Image: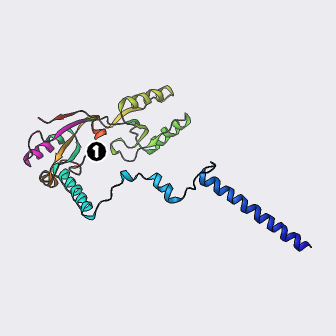
Amino acid sequence: MLRMVALVLLLANALLLAGQWALFDRLGADGGRPGGARQREPERLARQVDPQAVTILSPQAASAADAAASVAKTAQAAAGACLEAGPFSAAEADAAERTLREAGLAEGSWLSIQAEDRGAYLVYIGRFADRDALQAKREQLNRIKVDAEELRSSPNLQPGLSLGRFDDKPAADAALALLQQRGVRTARVVALRPAQGLTVLRLPAADPSVRARLAGLRLPSGPGFVACVAQAAASAAPASVNR
């Protein structure tokens, strides 16, 4: 008797599950709309792809398209590449331009792009008579909670203490003023690298023959002529054709 009841329950569950799956299938097929057509993969794909917009090329046409792209790329390379060298100091820029003239490059074929190096500055205490004097000063600064770092790569300033490095003099002067308000009296601002004008030499359209000449040139500094930086960044700097 129990076996019969178990079989009946099992059969009822199977029928219920089958009915539910059929209902879900109909809903998925027609979006719940009575009488909707079942959407299978081929039909769905046909709706996603616009046959009018697809062009199938023959092997000959595909080869011709590749050849045209290669010709365009070669023509672009022959038209010239943007190359630049520097930045140079004023004296280095004069020497580099003289080198370009001696290499046979025409006047006006390059640009002189002016930039500015704002320098590097240090809030500094020193030089001390010896390391004992340096250490005594450092302990004094620690008591008023001022950080100081012993200089190790500036022989002309050693033994000495750095209270901060800055990319321009106004920032260094402002930091010194704040330190003076905290009781630091013997610090001063020194220039690690003074502000100076810089020049980048740019050839906006160097063809293969020009690039061959540039490859053998020895310039005052740097790696020589390399690919130009992003044009968006370059357009922010003023440029003038060399005279």
Residue neighbourhood size for the residue with mark 1, other residues' Cα within 10 Å, grouped as few (<14), some (14–19), many (≥20): few
In the picture, the quarter occupied by the C terminus is top left
Name the residue carrying label 1: 229
> Whole-percent x and y of residue 46?
46, 55
Q: Residue, x 24% and y 32% (percent of image)?
A: 238
Does 101 appear in magenta?
A: yes
- Which contiguous range is marked in magenta? 95-114
Q: Residue furthest right?
A: 1
Image quarter of residue 2: bottom right
User: As displayed, is residue 175 above or below residue 6?
Assistant: above
Identify the secondary structure beneath mark 1: loop
Observer-nearest of 54 and 113:
54
Observer-nearest of 215 and 223:
215
Image quarter of residue 173: top left
> Whole-percent x and y of residue 206?
16, 48
Q: Residue, x 84% and y 68% (percent of image)?
A: 8
> Whole-percent x and y of residue 28?
62, 54
Observer-nearest of 166 and 68:
68
Q: Total number of numbered labels?
A: 1
Does 178 appear in magenta?
A: no
Q: Is residue 146 at least partly visible in the picture?
A: yes
User: As displayed, is residue 213 above or below residue 63?
Assistant: above
